[in-house]
Image (cartoon, rainbow, N blue to C red):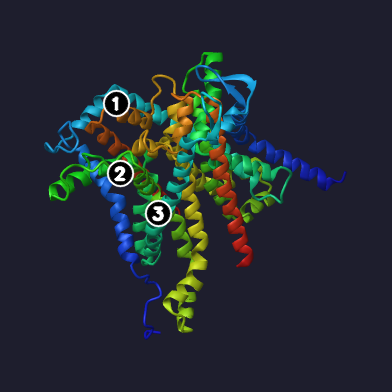
Amino acid sequence: MDAETLAARADARRRWGLAAPAVAIITLFSILPLGVVLVYSFLAPGDFGNVRWQLSFEGWFSVLFERDIFDDTISLSDAHLTILGRSVALSLATTLITLVLGLPTAWFIATRPLHQRAFWLFLITIPFWTNLLVRTIAVQEMIRSEGVFNRLFLWLGLIDAPIQMMFTNFAVLVGMAYVFLPLMVLPVYSAIEKFDFRLAEAGYDLYASRAYCLRRVILPMVRPGIIAGSILVFVPSLGAYVTPRIMGGGKSMMLGNLIEMQFGQGRNWPLGAALSLTLTALVLAALIWYTRLTSGGRRNG
Amino acid sequence: MADRAFDTRRLPGATVLALACFVILYIPMVILVANSFNTGKVIGQWEGVSLHWYARALQNDAFLAAARTSLILASLAALIATITATMAALATTRSRGFRGEGTIHIVLNQPIMVPEIVLAIALLIIIAQIKQATGYTGLGYLVIAHSAFCIPFAYMPIRARLEGMDLTLETAAADLYAGRLYTFRKVTLPLLAPGILAGFMLAFVISLDDVVISDFLKSPGQDTLPTYLLGELRRNLTSEIYAISSLLLLISVLIVAGSWLLTRKKT
């Protein structure tokens, strides 16, 4: 063994030693608990929560199917499918809304003169750092039955009785779009900020139309920011728990709320564990799709 | 080029949508703060401006206890996360690749890849059993759990700072026979300080922001500000909620403004 490999080994040992505390904390308090969830998803539910140590696939089975209590016929679980579908649909809609509002905002900030940009960015950073629960309470005040919109509409005589907006898919969507909007603006902004506008000018000088230039010059350069923003909004939307709980209540549940229910009133820990892993798998799929898309883009560009 | 028919930096409608976006972001927060100054008990029935609900909140023992818990928890978790993340960042940057580098990287980023509710459930299962087995129900569980999910956030700015750092100063120190530890203390650490500070602040805010994991893991009497607020929201909707929310909002404004001033001075 030559001196170089020995030195390399000593270096690797030193580096592992330095990383050890962080790696240990995360392994023990984030990775190991997930391993326990995986094990629990293959066990039988206990009578009062918890699990019985007995191999069972019932937890995973119940994610999508249900058994009739009388004649054991198997059918798709409508309740679970509705919640799963709602989670995906509302997360996609949230991403779309935040993109429609966030892209022009990012564009607006990036095209301000340099000394003004800090101020506009500051305005985006404040809600970004404000407690999620506080922002959910703020948006709830807008649309609840005695809230700002209803009182305004009543006062204007547009409606005779308050419109029930809370505890609907609409309320969850409004809440999530409001709460996650800053997450879209920041990455899109940093992509537009890097864009060299001389490229667009070159396009125009070569008689490209505005639409053509936007599509072929600007959009491809800003695309990584749009993708990053979309994933930053979609992933936490899919796993959202606090906002749908306050805005949707028991009527418009998302996957996160269904999971929590299995460990509370519903009391089916293996099902809760299987649902947790389903949600994690969906999130990981989105993240893998994202890395594929961005690394693929780099190769082409 | 003055004869170009349009400005390349103008996107039709962008300004209108952007200003609408700022209005949408701020109106709910402004109304929230305005409501906190309402004297009346019932939200929406305006009975005059006062600091009544702030005074009540500050006399409310449960709120004060929650504020103290939040402060202790966020400080300890951010401290642990920052120290361990700094060490980890030193381990994973400026290397020519070593065995297991990829593994360390995946582990350090793992907490942000898992939905918070899933992590909360997973921790609940384990920690409920440890609580039962050991009888210890202190704040330690929350501190270590918060440290775990704060590490990736502390790690990011510290790592970024390290990667952008110039190696020549450290090489110069080494050439002048400064020992490894001395070089680290006198050269590397001062250069790294802004990254470490940014990492600490990020970790602190992330810990302060957490609702779900704290709500699931807390023992009786361990409410943090967000879990207390969540509980109040379930129990009774009074203007006190708006006062407490406004105080939390104020904290974030102060932190953002503070970090703004800090980074401005440094660059």
Q: Residue furthest front?
A: A71
Circle 1 SS class: helix
**The C terminus of chain A lies in quadrant:** bottom right
The residue carrying mark 3 is A98
The residue carrying mark 2 is A139
Q: Residue furthest right?
A: A1
Residue B39 location (% of width, % of height): 15, 34
Residue A46 location (% of width, % of height): 55, 18
Q: Which mark is residue A166?
A: none
Circle 3 SS class: helix
Up-down: is A122 above or below B232? below
The residue carrying mark 1 is B235
Pick whichever, B98 or B7, lies toward us: B7
**The N terminus of chain A lies in quadrant:** top right
Residue depicted at x 32% and y 61%: B17
What is the chain letter for disc 3?
Answer: A
Residue depicted at x 58% and y 41%: A281
Q: Are marks 2 and 3 on the same chain?
A: yes
